[in-house]
Amino acid sequence: MAPAATTPVVTLRPTGAVRRRQRVEQVVKAGLLGTASVSVLTTVLIVFSLLQPTVEFFREVSVGAFFGGTDWAPNFQPASFGVWPIVGGTLVVTGIAVLVAVPCGLGVAFYLSEYARPRVRRVLKPVLELLAGIPTVVFGFFALTFVNPKLVDRFWPIGDVSTFSALGAGLVMGVMIVPIMTSLSEDAMSAVPESLRQAGVALGATRREVSTKVVFPAALSGIVAATVLAVSRAIGETMIALLAAGNRPNLSANPGEDMQTMTAYIGSTALGDIATQTIQYKTIFAVGALLFAVTFVLNIASARVVRRFRQAYE
Amino acid sequence: MVIAVNDLMQLHRPASTPPTSHPVVMEAVGLSVSYGAFRAVRDVDLAIRRREITALIGPSGCGKSTVLRCFNRMNDLVESARVEGRLTYHGIDVYGPDADAGEVRRRIGMVFQKPNPFPKSIYENVAFGARVNGRRSKAELDELVERSLRGAALWDEVKHRLRASALSLSGGQQQRLCIARAIAIEPEVLLMDEPCSALDPVATAYIEDLMHDIKERYAIVVVTHNMQQAARVSDRTAFFTTEVADHGDRRTGVLVEFGRTADVFSKPADERTERYITGRFG
């Protein structure tokens, strides 16, 4: 007997088209995971490629001689592997760059986020981001041919300034990093809900007070992240230091002198004639591993700082 | 119709109100607000009195919030906003050359629709206004925080965790914290922009009780969508509605009726008020 015509046949089983769409979803998911794993995999590979030559380096050079010495001359006879001169050069150049980039970047971010009219902001932000697109070699040349002779040489009061200076390199590096600092911290400030600004204003606070007492603390985790990225960029920046800082290992506190950063050492040595398996070759990896470790520690430390001071507003 | 409204407002002008009325703190005369070419609300006459709760009610877009935000010059933040007419605080023009917006806001506090505590500790939220408006000693701040939290009926719930984040509080507690924060600047007028619209009925009842308790010390103006709330808490009610402007199709808000809440709700003078409060509006 046929079923009653009034009872419709219901099925929840997927049709062919639905199954095809589900397969597409699977493929897309796998593809996206693949792109994400590229960067993770690269990091792992870098660590591995650094590891072996670095271990070999420390078989020939003692850890004490590397971290305790103040004479860096790995390519001379007799070679000396005291890393402090190039660590010092990195610290000086990075320090100057950060001293320029963080206040300037924050100032611009405050202006764009809290003061600028929307129209000004629409024009200014892309112009600033253009600055981030200038190749670092151009910045390096600018430091070498303009900032060092025209500014540092003329105005730096301590000692004689040669063609090269850590100060010139650091200043220009700082300017180069400003857009990164600005862009990230401005994003963090703009993400602070308008209702919090209104609350501040309604309590009689001025725009400056709202900026510093409401927006800044609420955006702090983003600002710290921006600062860490700026520091990492400065530590890792090679071309400006190579061209303008002088490339001479020099443990000195006077930024008017020429210096060599860790990155500039790696860059210049890697370009020279160095046979693999020589101690000079392995030294490059040891310095690279040290750079990696420094930025890694910096990132972890900043994550802690962010957790400590975090003001979530959701 | 227009004539009737005007007559009614004459009746409720300060001079003709009964002698039991409290003194006027703020007064709007012919107040209009435009955003660019769009006139949001026009020709509002209102008197806000000490120790009274004035409710602004009306349908969406009638300009009641816009009017409220004139009282402490929050419309200054909207670049295209233009305020016409006269708005005075103890006879001083709030928008006059002698009035500083910050000073205005220190005397006329505000509580917003959605609780908006700062992502700081409970203590720092309440102390914010005092810290901004001149330093005080730790002891004075402690005292101010306790007094304000007590004033907002929140002290007993938070006294053991003043250093905890304000965001760890429930929505109703957050709103009471915002009230504590507003009264900590010791204002004379308290503006509340739909203070319960984001809260559940229990939290709403708390806030309403609180409003009733603190009205002895402040002139309160509350915008509400909830007519029962207006009837429950307010002494006077201003009913706004919208009307099609002379040109264009956008609607401008107008004040229809302003009077004692009991009168407005029991014997509204205007047919539009009656239709709205009996739920037969639009």
Image (tube, coloured by chain):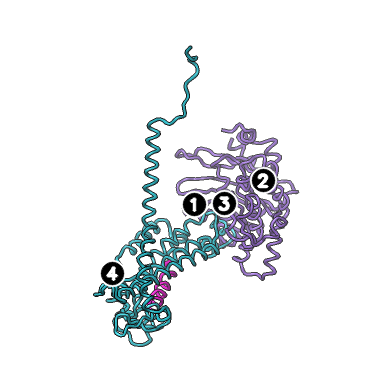
Question: Mark 1 or 3 closer to N-term?
Answer: 3
In the image, the segment drawn in magenta is A89-105
Left or right, residue A24 beside residue B143: left
Q: SS class of the residue under badge 4?
A: helix
Determine which quarter of the picture holds residue A66.
Answer: bottom left
Residue contact at pointers 1 and 3, CB within 8 angstroms: no
For residue A212, above or below residue B170 = below
Instruction: Quote the CA–CA distance across marks 2 and 1.
Output: 32 Å
Tell me the chain of label 3. Answer: B
In front of the other: A243 or A126: A243
Check disc 4 and report the residue beneath it. A137
In the image, which is nearer the foreground, mark 2 or mark 3?
Answer: 2
Residue pointed to by mark 3: B69
Do badges 2 and 1 share one subunit? yes
| Labels 3 and 4 positioned on one and the same chain | no
Chain letter for the purple colouring in the rendering: B
Q: How far apart are marks 2 and 3 (CA)?
A: 22 Å
Q: Do labels 1 and 3 share a chain?
A: yes
- Is label 4 or label 2 in front? 4
Q: Name the residue under label 2.
A: B204
Does B281 appear above or below A170? above
Of callouts 2 and 3, the N-terminal one: 3
- How would you rate the neighbour count of disc 1 (Cα within 10 Å): few for under 14, some for 14-19, many for 20 or more? some
A210 displayed left or right of A139: right
